[in-house]
Amino acid sequence: MSGTEPLLLRHDAGGVATLTLNRPAQFNALSEALLAELLGALQAIGADESVRVVVVAGAGRAFCAGHDLKEMRANHEKAYMQALFRQCARVMTAITALPQPVIARVHGVATAAGCQLVAACDLAVAADVAKFAVSGINVGLFCSTPAVALSRNMGRKQAMEMLLTGEFIDALEAQRRGLVNRVVPADALDAELARLTDSISEKSALALRLGKELFYRQLETGVDAAYQLAAETMACNMMSEDAAAGIDAFMAKRPPR
């Protein structure tokens, strides 16, 4: 890849915006510049009502190999590291805050912050050849920021095992642990992804936005507060034109419009 090629590619089709990490020679490592591009693209998509679903993908052989270690070693100052990890956290939380569902398309290796990126997405579809690890511990660096997303996707002991050993798991094991939703042969990855995006795209954008926001907010509260949030969201959703049209269509036994 020449130095003039963009670090992040965006392709829109049928209401699906695909963001492709485009540093294949560096296994799509999350450099400062790539993180900035990704954050800017997510913010733009959040305001784009034509986008119904977002897909995050990687160019080349890997999905994402985590942070750019060469860049980090070249800037060995605590202030730099703090700013870098805050920037990465903004990207991950932007995915959660996005009104549209975000799906990771994992065709290859996802390690460290790359595994964190998979975990931060709302859904993930993986090729059967994909592998996952939070391997910082192998070089003396506990993957603390990936631990935040990982521990919110799988059981604590399963997450801790990955974090403490740095060992890789395959796609089927990642599915069993709750890190990915679907695993298919590599040549069927895009077809499976299309089935999922088509299914989501035909749903009410308002209901998806309300539901996604509620889902993550209630996770961070106690049960009573969660039910209060859910009840308010349901009440607001029921008052919408989308819900009225959908329920009327259901009762009339016809497709909703």
Image: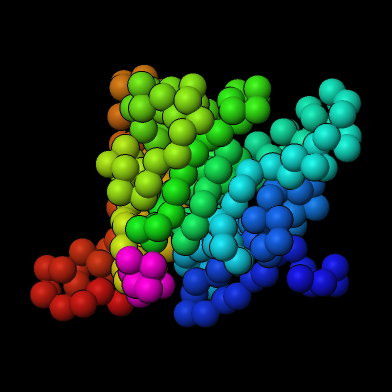
* Residue 101 left/right relative to 46: left
Residue 101 in view, yes or no: no
Q: How is the image coloured?
A: rainbow
Q: Main secondary structure of the magenta part?
A: helix
With respect to residue 217, does 106 lie above or below?
Answer: below
Residue 28 percent location from the top left of the image: 66, 56
Pick whichever, 172 or 95, lies toward us.
172
| Residue at 35% in and 58% down | 128
With respect to residue 92, does 9 lie above or below?
Answer: below
Residue 5 percent location from the top left of the image: 79, 72
- Indicate whether residue 87 is drawn in magenta: no
* Residue 229 left/right relative to 110: left
Pick whichever, 245 or 29, lies toward us.
29
Q: Which residues are magenta?
A: 185-194
- On-image quarter of the C terminus: bottom left
| Residue at 47% in and 67% down | 52
| Residue at 52% in and 80% down | 13
- On-image quarter of the N terminus: bottom right
Residue 25 percent location from the top left of the image: 71, 61
Residue 182 in view, yes or no: yes
Residue 175 percent location from the top left of the image: 31, 46
